[in-house]
Image (tube, rainbow, N blue to C red):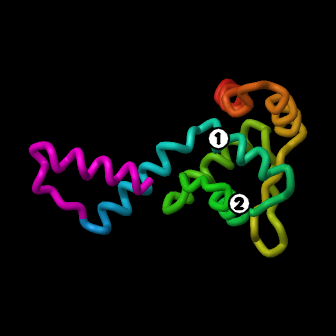
Amino acid sequence: MEDKLNKLNRAMKRTVFADVKFTDKQKTAIKQRLVQAKESDEEVMIAIFRILQEEQSGYQIMSSLIRRGIEKFTEQEGILYTMLHDLEQRGFIEAKWEQTEKKSYCLSNKGRRMLAKSESKQNAGSYILQTVLEG
């Protein structure tokens, strides 16, 4: 990622933006956007389905995604919970409230069948994304 920023910096020095300087805050924002851009929706969806083979809380899902290098939801946790709610409404995952008022998620039978079928296909992430979007 540093290499991409260095190339961008060198290119900018040769153009009309030669006097533009990035603050540390701007550099961090650019790095985050580069990370988010490289994580396709297919990769994110297949990772979530694989994580949810075992019951997990939203926090645990987020932590697992970050450990896998998927930082798409960092600072945007609400998008993850919206996605989980949508997957629950479509019947791919099940959610339950624990006594501690913590919600946990896991794949439903429908989600397990789709994950198994997708893993037998060459483009697993694409298959899952297409199936989820089509309902």
Q: Residue at x 79, y 47 (%)?
A: 50
Image vertical order of residue 130 relative to residue 99, above or below? above
Mark 1, other Cα within 10 Å: few <14 / some 14–19 / many ≥20: some
Mark 2, other Cα within 10 Å: few <14 / some 14–19 / many ≥20: some
Rendered image: mark on residue 131: none
Rendered image: mark on residue 43: 1
Rendered image: mark on residue 64: 2
Residue 117 in the image: state x and y as whole percent.
85, 28
Image vertical order of residue 49 relative to residue 110, above or below? below
Mark earlier in primary sequence (1, 2): 1
Pick the residue in front: 131 or 63. Answer: 63
Residue numbers of the magenta segment: 1-22
Q: Which amino acid type is shown beneath numbered disc 1?
A: Glu
Q: Residue at x 64, y 44 (%)?
A: 44
Q: Are marks 1 and 2 in contact (CB under 8 Å)?
A: no
Residue 99: quarter of image: bottom right
Q: Residue at x 23, y 61 (%)?
A: 22
Residue 122 in the image: state x and y as whole percent.
75, 25
**Dot 2: what SS?**
helix
Residue 131: quarter of image: top right
The CA span between labels 1 and 2 is 13 Å
Q: Residue at x 82, y 36 (%)?
A: 115
In this rendering, would 92 be left or right of 39?
right
**Dot 1: what SS?**
helix
Q: Which amino acid type is shown beneath numbered disc 2?
A: Ser
Residue 133 in the image: state x and y as whole percent.
64, 29
